[in-house]
């Protein structure tokens, strides 16, 4: 898998966005780039089940979305490059 290293420190939530943990911000960033749960898990050194459980619970609730597609759309508007 691999790929270029990502600088999550620069992926900040814009003003007025929800309070996200660093890990939630990392997941949201990768989700917004179209990565699958398995790819996100590999990049963040997590188990795929961890990503599947974390995204639909606290992250989706904080974003006010119902599914992965809505979360990816919100990622595009919330995360500044």
Image (cartoon, rainbow, N blue to C red):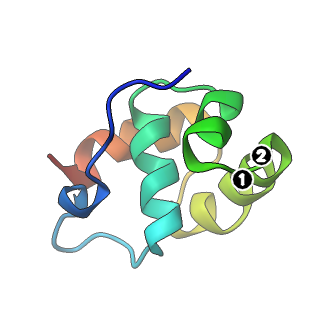
Q: Secondary structure at mark 1?
A: helix
Count of labels in the image: 2
Q: Secondary structure at mark 2?
A: helix
Q: Residue at x 66, y 53 (%)?
A: 55
60 displayed left or right of 14: right
Mark 1, residues whose alpha carbon is within 10 Å: few (<14), some, or many (≥20)? some
In the image, residue 28 lies at what x, y percent?
Answer: 46, 49
Q: Residue at x 85, y 46 (%)?
A: 49
Residue closest to the eye, 11 or 43: 43
Residue that protrudes farthest toward the right in the picture: 49
Tell me whether the residue at label 1 lies in contact with that at label 2, contact meaning CB atoms closer than 8 angstroms.
Answer: yes
Query: Residue 52 — which label?
Result: 2
Q: Nearer the viewer, mark 1 or mark 2?
A: 2
In the image, residue 46 lies at what x, y percent?
Answer: 71, 51
In the image, residue 8 lies at what x, y percent?
Answer: 30, 56
Mark 2, residues whose alpha carbon is within 10 Å: few (<14), some, or many (≥20)? some
From the viewer's perspective, is residue 44 above or below residue 38?
A: below
Image quadrant occupied by the N terminus: top right
Q: Quadrant of residue 78?
A: bottom left
How far apart are the alpha carbons under marks 1 and 2?
7 Å
Residue closest to the eye, 73 or 11: 11
70 displayed left or right of 80: right
Q: Residue at x 48, y 75 (%)?
A: 21
Q: Residue at x 37, y 46 (%)?
A: 74
76 displayed left or right of 37: left
Query: Residue 66 — which label?
Result: none
Query: Residue 56 — which label?
Result: 1
């Amino acid at each position: 898998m691999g790929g270029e290293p990502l600088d999550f420190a620069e992926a900040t939530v814009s003003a007025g966005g929800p309070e996200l943990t660093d890990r939630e911000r990392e997941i949201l960033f990768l989700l917004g780039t179209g990565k699958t749960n398995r790819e996100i898990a590999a990049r963040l050194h997590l188990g795929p089940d961890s990503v599947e459980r974390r995204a639909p619970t606290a992250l989706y609730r904080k974003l006010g979305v119902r599914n992965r597609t809505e979360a990816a759309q919100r990622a595009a508007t919330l995360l500044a490059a």
